Amino acid sequence: MSAELLSGTAMRREILAELAAEVQSLQEQHGVRPGLVTILVGKNPASVSYVSLKVKTALELGFHEVQESLPETISEADLLAAIEAWNRDPSIHGILVQLPLPPHIDEKKVINAIDPDKDVDGFHPVNLGRMVLGGEEARFLPCTPAGIREMLVRSGTPLAGAEVVVVGRSNIVGKPIALMLAQKGPGGDATVTCVHTHTRDLAGHCKRADILIVAAGKPGLIKPEWIKPGATVIDVGVNRIGESASGKALLAGDVDFAGAREIAGKITPVPGGVGPMTIAMLMKNTVRSAWLHCGEKR
Ligand code: GUN
């Protein structure tokens, strides 16, 4: 039987409708609009496209949105000064610097320069520390792993005691999602294994996963026979595998989708799975930041 498709596009719509109601409450109760600045350095085509989508979504939600486009040649000192100015601006609750940055700029320094209480990407070491502590301490969770967890929770996938296998250990997906799902409490309580390039029996680990989360960046890495019948498969891979006749990028995940779909219980498509959830979570973090700046814990 074919697996149920977990549509990030449909879930994003649901989340944005909930956020629109919160934006209205913020306005009514505090006269505040969530403020987001999106900083784009240079003209990397993928970054331009991601940032335009973030700006469009923020505007649709009624945010105070500022898009700052800076030249590829900007010095590190000037970029840090721009961030400092946004840190001090009370109309701004979220600062996003689109990555990657040009090679002459130290990404770590830039991330560290953002006020942790405006770091809606959740990349600042303070927010990663808060995430590790978990529970009430967690503030802004990184958007892609937060989106994955939201998909699991909203689709009614049981997490407590589930065997979760995460393929990949990047700072922005693998490591945080492994930690988040192992935390005590709702949306956690799973038994998590994180596998990577040095793991001896990748197939063996995948085969016992009730929930398999793949963020390796290798098209077709996960074979259908590695999937436990009925498992939930979350494919985070976004690999360009060619171009359509009209020049549009053709994308594929890390999982052999056609085969996996016949074995899994639920599966995310690529595109249209995890991707749309990332932007929804960025918006959610920005709304949360606006509430927190109004002295309300949400
Ligand atoms: N580049 C690719 N993904 C992301 C993201 O989630 N946030 C930022 N700031 N840059 C990115």
Image (spheres, helix red, strand yellow):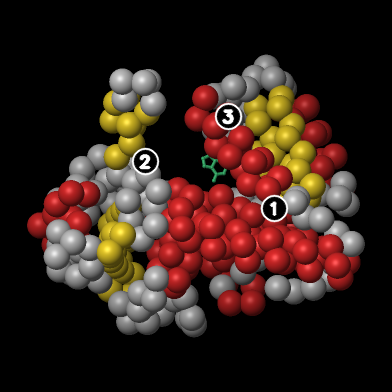
Residue 192: x %, y % from top left: 33, 70
The residue under label 1 is 61
Which kind of residue does numbered mark 2 sit on? Val
Give the residue type that dot 1 points to: Leu
Specify whether tag 2 is near ligand 1 (CB below 8 Å): no
Q: Which residue is tagged 2?
A: 238
The picture quadrant where one finds residue 230 is bottom left
In the picture of the structure, the residue carrying the numbered disc 3 is 48
Q: Residue at x 85, y 59 (%)?
A: 32
Quarter, ligand 1: top right
Q: Which residue appears at 77% of the width and 64% of the height? A: 24
- Closer to the chain start, of discs 3 and 2, is 3
Q: Nearer the viewer, residue 64 or 21?
A: 21
Secondary structure at numbered mark 3: helix
Residue 254 seen anywhere in this rendered image of the structure: yes
On whether ligand 1 comes within 8 Å of the CB at mark 1, the answer is no
Q: Secondary structure at mark 2?
A: loop
Q: Is residue 202 visible?
A: no
Between 94 and 35, the residue placed more toward the observer is 35
Q: Amino acid at mark 3?
A: Val
Residue pictured at 72% horizontal, 66% vertical: 22
Q: Nearer the viewer, mark 1 or mark 3?
A: 1
Q: CA distance from mark 1 to mark 3?
A: 20 Å
Q: Which mark is residue 211?
A: none
